């Protein structure tokens, strides 16, 4: 007599399926056992085993899923798997801003403003705080009495440790979220330098690792005397926390300087502050989706930048870069031989700052060096602005303004540079990357895609009555993209087809 049924579905691993299989097993072995009521003690045992099996299979499924970077959902597992590929997830980046300190009248003596001075927004609850990175001075008699300084959305923390003569020392830092690259470490035997690995460190090299966990808490790891020199005496550590996109505040929002200020003779002064331009550079920590995309790509590039795609991959390794396109003379005959143009789009869209373009150039020429004779230029992207005009019929009872806002929000989502998880939005791309069936560049924003977005918006009954009721750049047709063009949403004009008025 067969112990199990001839056909077994091993994908049935939930409680009900396991209970049914156990009952089938029992009936095959004990044909006289027919009492499987809830109150039966035998049924209690069957359900207990089914429950345990359900839990065990749940753990097994999770272990299988978390063992692969493409399916892992826990940040600590993605961090560990990425490390196997030599890739490190980046944390938040701190925004910076240029601020202007001013006095109501020229001072009679120098007025110093020390580094670390906190400048914040006006909100009483949860203001956004920045710290001054370097001392500034308003000289006596300066007219107008104002100076500029640079502030950063971060907090500086000092911390002391006792080395205790131990090798392979691990020291956790107290505060979070840690800002990458902000650690300064010194001990009795000298200053230490952060490295990506201690494998190449000698016994006298003062190198250390900074390991950041899933909670953005950092731990310092020192050498063991073979790979890296152990520290001695008191270890002095300073590091920064903070960062994130919340620091990208608008212009004239940093208006409060915390503390009491005086000139060099101790006379109090009334110090004002503002930021003439918006703060920039703040990014959130890398998402798991972004890490799952970029970590495998890092295997292709390794330590150099050679192929056209290498430039794009290495540029996108910078947290502030959302999209990148590299064109050479093979792609565009207007570009000189042995040179290339790298177009970059920052996170959130818009044009890259000069600082970001310099960082990208450094990334592809020094951090991951290209060939010596190859000339690279990093330039602003070429945007193709797509204007949308649509005549829509509203569903009965819908508020026109609410439908208008939903349509605009859906169109903005269609044209956004990146998804909310930090991965590239697949609905838009540079014209060079959109290919036809033969593999030739055929970049375009299709009329039908925009039509579907408008039509499928909640509250829209239908789009107009004919093909001309939706126009892109004044034409009821697709918008063609040049090789280097990236589409962005322009003006959206919505007309109520029943009243003829604007929504």
Image (cartoon, rainbow, N blue to C red):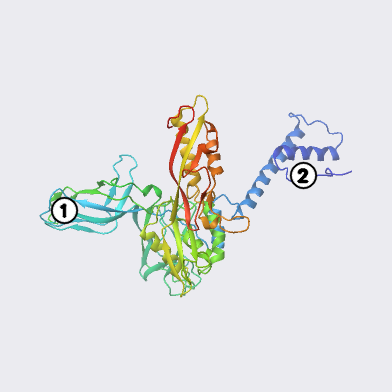
State the residue position of label 2: 9
Q: Where's residue 234, x and y in %?
A: 36, 64
The residues tagged by marks 2 and 1 sit, at their Cα atoms, a distance apart of: 81 Å
Classify 148 as above or below 299.
above
Tell me which label, 2 or 1, sits earlier in the chain: 2
Q: Position of residue 379 (x, y in %)?
A: 41, 61
Find disc 1 in the rendering and name its residue.
Answer: 145
| Image position, residue 498 (x, y; %) | 49, 27
Residue 143, by quadrant, is bottom left
Q: Taking 126 as reference, is 263 left or right?
A: left
In the rendered view, tell whether residue 70 sits above or below residue 195.
above
Q: Residue furthest right?
A: 1
Compared across the picture, whether 93 is left or right of 456 comes to left
Q: Of 16 and 465, which appears nearest the observer? A: 465
Residue 170 seen in the figure: no
Q: Determine the secondary structure under disc 1.
A: loop
Between marks 2 and 1 in the image, the one whose residue lies nearer the viewer: 1
Residue 161 marker: none
> Which one is in front, 286 or 167?
286
Which quarter of the figure is the N terminus placed in?
A: top right
Quarter placement of the C terminus? top left
Instruction: Count residues near mark 2 (Cα–Cα under 10 Å), then give few for <14, some for 14-19, many for 20+.
Output: few
In the image: residue 223, left or right of residue 236:
right
Q: Nearer the viewer, residue 44 or 205?
A: 205
Does residue 129 appear in the picture of this structure? yes
Q: Is residue 189 above or below residue 98?
A: below
């Amino acid at each position: 007599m067969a112990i199990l049924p001839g056909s077994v579905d091993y994908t049935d691993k939930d409680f009900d399926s396991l209970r049914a299989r156990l009952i089938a097993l029992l009936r095959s072995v004990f044909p006289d056992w027919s009492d499987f009521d809830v109150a039966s003690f035998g049924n209690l045992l069957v359900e207990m085993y089914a429950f345990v099996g359900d839990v065990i299979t749940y753990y097994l499924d999770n272990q299988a899923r978390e063992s692969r970077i493409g399916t892992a959902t826990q940040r600590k597992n993605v961090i560990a798997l990425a490390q196997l590929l030599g890739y490190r997830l980046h944390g938040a980046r701190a925004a910076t801003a240029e601020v202007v300190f001013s006095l109501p009248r020229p001072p009679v003596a120098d007025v110093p403003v020390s580094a670390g001075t906190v400048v914040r927004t006006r909100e009483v609850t949860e203001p956004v705080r920045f710290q001054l990175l370097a001392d500034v001075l308003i000289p006596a008699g300066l007219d107008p009495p104002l100076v500029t300084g640079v502030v950063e959305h971060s907090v500086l923390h000092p911390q002391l440790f006792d080395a205790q003569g131990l090798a392979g020392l691990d020291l956790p830092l107290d505060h979070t979220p840690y800002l990458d690259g902000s650690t300064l470490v010194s001990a009795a035997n000298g200053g230490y330098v952060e490295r990506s690995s201690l494998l190449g460190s000698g016994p006298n090299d003062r190198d250390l690792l900074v390991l950041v966990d899933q909670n953005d808490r950092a731990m310092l790891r020192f050498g063991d005397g073979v790979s890296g020199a152990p520290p001695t005496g008191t270890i002095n550590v300073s590091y920064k926390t903070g960062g994130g996109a919340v620091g990208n505040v608008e212009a004239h929002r940093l208006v409060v300087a915390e503390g009491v200020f005086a000139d060099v003779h101790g006379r109090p002064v009334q110090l004002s502050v503002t930021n003439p331009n918006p703060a920039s550079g703040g990014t959130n920590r890398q998402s798991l989706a972004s890490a799952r995309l970029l970590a495998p790509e890092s295997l292709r590039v390794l330590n150099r930048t050679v192929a056209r795609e290498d430039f794009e991959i290495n540029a996108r390794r910078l947290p502030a870069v959302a999209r990148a396109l590299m064109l050479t003379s093979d792609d565009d005959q207007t570009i000189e031989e042995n040179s290339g143009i790298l177009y970059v789009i920052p996170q959130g869209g818009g044009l890259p700052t000069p600082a970001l373009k310099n960082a990208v150039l450094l990334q592809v020429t020094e951090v991951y060096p290209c060939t010596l004779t190859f000339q690279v230029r990093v330039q602003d992207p070429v945007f193709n602005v797509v204007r949308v005009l649509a005549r829509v019929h509203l569903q009965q009872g819908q508020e026109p303004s609410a439908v208008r806002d939903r349509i605009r929000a859906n169109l903005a989502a269609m044209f956004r540079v990146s998804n909310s998880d930090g991965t590239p939005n697949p609905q838009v791309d540079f014209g060079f990357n959109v290919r036809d069936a033969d593999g030739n560049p055929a970049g375009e924003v299709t009329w039908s895609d925009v039509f579907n977005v408008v039509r499928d918006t909640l509250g829209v009954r239908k789009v107009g009555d004919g093909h001309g009721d939706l126009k892109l750049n004044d034409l009821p047709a697709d918008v063609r993209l040049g090789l280097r063009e990236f589409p962005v949403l322009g003006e959206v004009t919505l007309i109520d087809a029943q009243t003829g008025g604007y929504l």
